Amino acid sequence: HRLDKHSRVFGMQFLPYHWLLATVGHSGMLQYQDTSTGELISQHRTKLGPCHVMRQNPFNSVIHLGHTNGTVTLWSPSSSEYLVKLLCHKGNPITSLAIDRNGRYMATGGGDSKVKIWDLRTYKELHSYATYGGPPTSLDISQTGILGVGHGCHATFWKPDALSQKLKEPYMKHTLPGKGPLESLRFRPFEDVCGLGHARGIASIVVPGSGEPNLDSMEHFTNPYMDNRQRREAEVRSLLEKLSPDMIALDPDVIGSVEESNSILRRQRLRDLAEEADARKEAERDMEKNKKEKKRMRGRSKIAKKLQRKQKNIVDDNVNKLREAREREKAEKERARRRASGEG
């Protein structure tokens, strides 16, 4: 095949579930082409100049573009305008970008020699890490969440917790002396291997715990032991299950739901859902803090017994009156017993 409409391409991503090839280049034009039919689905002008950084979100297939003015824009083939625009590195170009497989965190590298971690649910910065030897030229997040950073002639790897909270020291470091700046860093799926591309070739290193140990053979083209017949069957099955480009959205759960015609009601519903989720999380935290009551003997854990035990610790006027009446009754019984024993 020859794609004449894609010229001076700097970035390329393939969407396997939609059979789409997305490219961006010197003109700043984002193009989507259906590889199964050869049809050009859509093309959008980013209006932000040449673009060298391009990654896809594996959770919702949204394309993330990093621009020279320090912004990151999110795109889908069904929208002529960007879905989200973030100013990640003010006054510095975006040099690299990576998104985790769950679509929750995004790591961006800029010309200010910083790696910033962003929460894609709130679009807010969580924390940042500084690099030495040059700006981060390549970022990647493994299947288990390990963050790989290529900067200068160094490769630094951070544990999965580095995305949700800031860590003091990296998990692993690797140096390529005399081999120029690191051009690319990518993890190999389902294996604890990371590939490094530099000025003099490529290198591969072992990163323990970076690959997913459990292989899902029902996924398309993930079984490394399939033969030619199985590969053809998987290709036919994936073509039959191909998703429409219009289904690419920030929230994949919106497919199949009914959207309110009133934008005010729609925003109110989203706020209510967010407040409900926050309240649920707060209730779960309170339940974890409270200790579970120890199991008692049979019959003593009933609600009536528990209420009776709780009422014992409550002191009010009625309880004092009952206690005084009980004391008087005990005293009268004692006097009556003494008189009876004296008469005998």
Image (tube, helix red, strand yellow):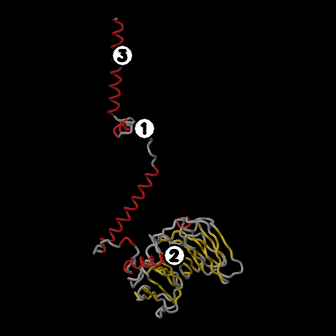
Residue 184 in which image quadrant? bottom right
The kind of residue on which mark 3 rests is: Glu
Residue 172 in which image quadrant? bottom right
Mark 2 residue crowding within 10 angstroms, few (<14) / some (14–19) / many (20+): few
- Of residue 187 and residue 324, the one placed in the foreground of this image is 187
Which circle, 2 or 3, is nearer the viewer? 2
State the mark number for residue 240. Answer: none
Label 3 secondary element? helix
Mark closer to the chain start, 2 or 3: 2
Label 1 secondary element? loop
Q: CA distance from mark 2 to mark 3?
A: 98 Å
> Furthest-front residue in view?
229
Residue 159 in which image quadrant? bottom right
Whether the residues at callouts 1 and 3 have beta carbons within 8 Å, the answer is no
Q: Look at mark 3 in the image and give the residue it sits on.
A: 334
Q: CA distance from mark 2 to mark 1?
A: 61 Å
Mark 3 residue crowding within 10 angstroms, few (<14) / some (14–19) / many (20+): few
Left or right: residue 314 compared with residue 117: left
Estimate the x, y position of residue 198 in percent, counting from the top left.
Answer: 65, 81
- 220 w.r.t. 48: above or below: above
Q: Look at mark 1 in the image and give the residue it sits on.
A: 296
- Of residue 158 and residue 344, the one placed in the foreground of this image is 158
Mark closer to the chain start, 1 or 3: 1
Q: Is residue 274 visible?
A: yes
> Furthest-left residue in view?
261
Left or right: residue 272 compared with residue 73: left
Which circle, 1 or 3, is nearer the viewer? 1
Q: CA distance from mark 1 to mark 3?
A: 37 Å
The kind of residue on which mark 1 rests is: Arg
Estimate the x, y position of residue 53 in percent, counting from the top left.
Answer: 53, 82
Q: Look at mark 2 in the image and give the residue it sits on.
A: 227
Quadrant location, the C terminus: top left
